[in-house]
Image (spheres, rainbow, N blue to C red):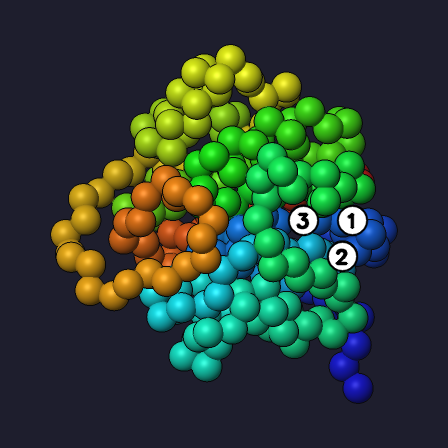
């Protein structure tokens, strides 16, 4: 019978038993499990993370199938967190996946008890919710590491995706909009944090042909064309930042 030792054989060969055990002990929460967050979650579970909380308010719709890990013709209509949880447990049945159908916003932030986690990941679309999560997560004790995704839409070139400190980001409209929000509110992140972004901004060449039926979670930054290879690279990079942090601390 296959067990976790078999699943993570290649991981253990690279990082060693002690670091693999450390990976399995870390608690991670991901807000937003769309094109970026779903691949981040899958990468983490495939790498040995066993304690993962996923948060999203939407159901799977047809327009998700081109770029989201759990979105298939069979899962359309399902609650996103439930569909992704099912897939993650297929990967590792021993993982502890907590699926929350909900939204992070100022009014709900205390419900999530973020200080309990080792890593907090922001893959939220809503600009206002994203701003609130950044402000809160960067005010938490330093043992809680925070990583954020900037906009992954309107991009095609995988070689342009990179990670940097938020205030160093250039060419990303979402990062610019967030900085403007912080300045207008006279509220700023309490500490530096790394983000994944790309400076590439392509035009939408097509027209809307399908209604994007998503939950009412407030205004999103925008609804633009998106490709799976880009959103997956964003998500894998976020997962990689977490795993690299665990690896470096374990050396």
Q: Nearer the viewer, residue 3 or 174?
A: 174
- The answer to which of marks 3 and 2 sits earlier in the sequence is 3
Task: Give the residue at the far bottom of this rendering.
Answer: 1
Using residue 115 as the reference point, say whether residue 78 is left or right of it: left
Asked whether disc 2 touches disc 1, contact meaning CB atoms under 8 Å apart, the reply is yes
**Count of picture labels:** 3
Q: Percent x, y for residue 10?
A: 69, 64
Residue occupied by mark 1 = 26
Above or below residue 95? Residue 216 is above
In the picture, the disc for residue 65 is: none
> Which residue is drawn at the image coordinates 65% and 32% (left, top)?
137
Q: Residues within 10 Å of mark 1 (few under 14, many from 20)?
A: some
Above or below residue 181? Residue 156 is below
Residue occupied by mark 3 = 29
Using residue 168 as the reference point, say whether residue 200 is left or right of it: left
Q: Quadrant of residue 152?
A: top left
In the picture, the disc for residue 51 is: 2
Tell me if residue 104 can be seen.
Answer: yes
């Amino acid at each position: 019978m296959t067990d976790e030792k078999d699943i993570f054989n290649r991981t253990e060969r690279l990082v060693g038993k002690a670091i693999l055990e450390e990976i399995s002990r870390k608690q991670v929460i991901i807000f937003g499990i769309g094109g970026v967050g779903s691949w981040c979650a899958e990468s983490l579970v495939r790498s040995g993370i066993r304690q993962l909380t996923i948060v999203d308010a939407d159901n799977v719709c047809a327009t998700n199938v081109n770029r989201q890990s759990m979105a298939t013709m069979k899962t359309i209509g399902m609650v996103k967190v439930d569909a992704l949880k099912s897939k993650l447990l297929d990967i590792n049945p021993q993982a502890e996946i907590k699926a929350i159908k909900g939204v992070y916003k100022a009014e709900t932030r205390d419900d999530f008890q973020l200080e309990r986690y080792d890593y907090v990941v922001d893959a939220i679309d809503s600009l206002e919710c994203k701003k609130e999560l950044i402000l809160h997560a960067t005010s938490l004790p330093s043992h809680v590491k925070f990583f954020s995704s900037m906009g992954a839409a309107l991009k095609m070139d995988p070689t342009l995706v990179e990670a940097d400190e938020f205030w160093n980001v250039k060419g990303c409209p979402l990062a610019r909009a967030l900085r403007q929000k912080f300045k207008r509110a006279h509220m700023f992140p309490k500490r530096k944090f790394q983000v994944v972004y790309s400076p590439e901004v392509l035009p939408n060449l097509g027209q809307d042909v399908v209604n994007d039926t998503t939950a009412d979670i407030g205004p999103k930054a925008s609804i633009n064309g998106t490709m799976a290879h880009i959103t997956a690279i964003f998500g894998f990079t976020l997962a990689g930042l977490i795993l690299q942090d665990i690896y470096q601390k374990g050396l």
